[in-house]
Image (cartoon, coloured by chain):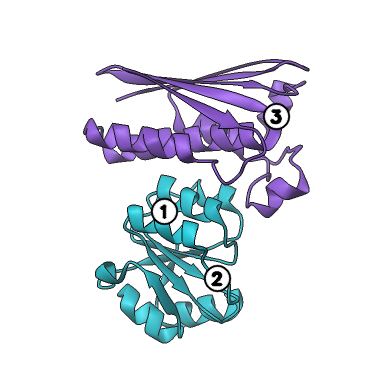
Chain colours: A cyan, B purple
Amino acid sequence: MEIQKVAELLNAKIVCGSNFLNSTIEHVFASDLMSDVLTLDTHNLLLVTGLCNLQTIRTAEMADISNILFVRGKKVTPEMKKIAEENQMVLLECPYSMFKAIGMLYVKGMQPVY
Amino acid sequence: MIFKYEIEGGNFTKAGNASSNVKKTLKQLNVNPSIIKRIVVALYEAEVNVVAHAYKGEITADITPERICICIEDDGPGIPDIDLAMQEGYSTASQKVREMGFGAGMGLPNIKKNVDQLNISSQVGKGTIVELTTFF
């Protein structure tokens, strides 16, 4: 699914990365634990998280994850946005709960990492 | 080439800066992206460990055409039992560290998984030295 479609489906605000909205997502991983995110080795991944701080962005940078969906109405800070832009990431803010967001993505055929 | 970076204990706003710089350097050197990822994930875990547990630290990255050796040396409480610390799930992290998304006892095992060679030495009350080597 294109990241643009993810944003539309989940009523999500595009915070940055609007030049990359046609990139395709195949897998979704939902976690608030960055230690778990750092164990992944999956390409074309969307990270869904309610953990909204600078370390979320740094974790994604190290793990080569370019797309992050923040759930539960979490707001990206200017510093997070700056580092995400430097790394050509797409950041989305979604008002839905983690359960609702990943449920909607699952129904649309998005694949789990494991 | 040798690069050095300072780490501030407790300062999570800067955690990852050194790993980010090492990643940029390795990309400029055209190192295989999957090897870069393994190196920087291990380094980032180690950097977060210093921020989470130590007072201050220093990273020295020594890069040759064949390999990268990274030494992460900190002034901190040290690790009383390294074998125990290497066990997945064992953690002494504070609530603050857990709120940042870490502290689940997976850092050292994940470092080991991502590097070719790992050496850890520690003195309680003085600090810890973590040495990572990965061949390109």
Q: Which amino acid does label 3 sit on?
A: Ala
* Cα gap from disc 3 to disc 1, whole angstroms: 32 Å
Q: What residue type is labelled 2?
A: Lys
Q: What residue type is labelled 1?
A: Ile
Q: Give the numbered dot on residue A83.
A: 1
Is there one chain holding both mark 2 and mark 1?
Answer: yes
Residue A57 to residue A18: above or below? above
Q: Give the numbered dot on residue A75.
A: 2
Residue B67 is situated, as x and y percent measured from the top left of the image, at: 32, 20
Q: Can the viewer see residue A114 in this picture?
A: no
Residue B30 to residue A89: above or below? above
Q: Is residue B129 left or right of residue A19?
A: right
Nearer to us in this view, B54 or A49: B54
**Which residue corresponds to the image point at 62% horizontal and 22% vertical from the top-left?**
B74
Q: Can the viewer see residue A5 in this picture?
A: yes
Which chain does tag 2 point to? A
> Which mark sits nearer the N-terminus, 2 or 1?
2
Q: Give the numbered dot on residue B85.
A: 3
Residue B75 is situated, as x and y percent measured from the top left of the image, at: 67, 20
